[in-house]
Image: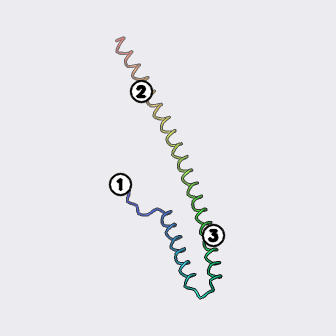
Amino acid sequence: MRDEGYSAGSILLSFLLGGVVGAGCALLFAPQSGRETRQKIRELTDEVKEKTADYAHQAKEKVSSLVDEGKGYYDEKKSILKSAVEAGKEAYEKEKEKYAKG
């Protein structure tokens, strides 16, 4: 059972979302004109979109690399197991011939 807490990705996403909410509140309550506030919100939204896209790209790369690593590990273990099964079959056949002759 896995009980390690939160992953680094979920913690990063939580901080990112918290920052967005905090920045949004700061913009809404700051003494500025509506035009300035809308401009800052637009800039903040663009920045969040960019950071989210970057985070998603990094996560995709990491998952892809882990999948490739897992496939390599699986292929390696499969090869080892296949060799062991073949060696077991050969040993069985040798013993079988030995008892058949003797």
Q: Position of residue 52 (x, y in %)?
A: 58, 64
Of circles 1 and 3, the one toward us is 3
The residue sitting at 43% across, 29% down in the picture is 85
Q: How many dots with numbers?
A: 3
Q: First in sequence, mark 3 or 2: give its number.
A: 3
Of circles 2 and 1, the one toward us is 1
Taking the view exactly as shown, the residue that stands out farthest to the front is 34
63 vs 22, nearest the viewer: 22
Q: Name which residue type carries label 1.
A: Met
State the residue position of label 1. Answer: 1
- Numbered circle sitting on residue 46: 3
68 vs 30, nearest the viewer: 30
Q: Name which residue type carries label 3.
A: Asp
Q: Is residue 99 left or right of residue 34?
A: left
Q: Name which residue type carries label 2.
A: Gly
State the residue position of label 2. Answer: 88
Per the model, the C-alpha gap separating discs 1 and 3 is 40 Å
47 vs 38, nearest the viewer: 38
Of circles 3 and 2, the one toward us is 3
Secondary structure type for disc 1 = loop
Label 1 neighbour load within 10 Å: few <14, some 14-19, many 20+ = few
Q: First in sequence, mark 1 or 3: give its number.
A: 1
Label 3 neighbour load within 10 Å: few <14, some 14-19, many 20+ = few
Q: Position of residue 94 (x, y in %)?
A: 41, 19
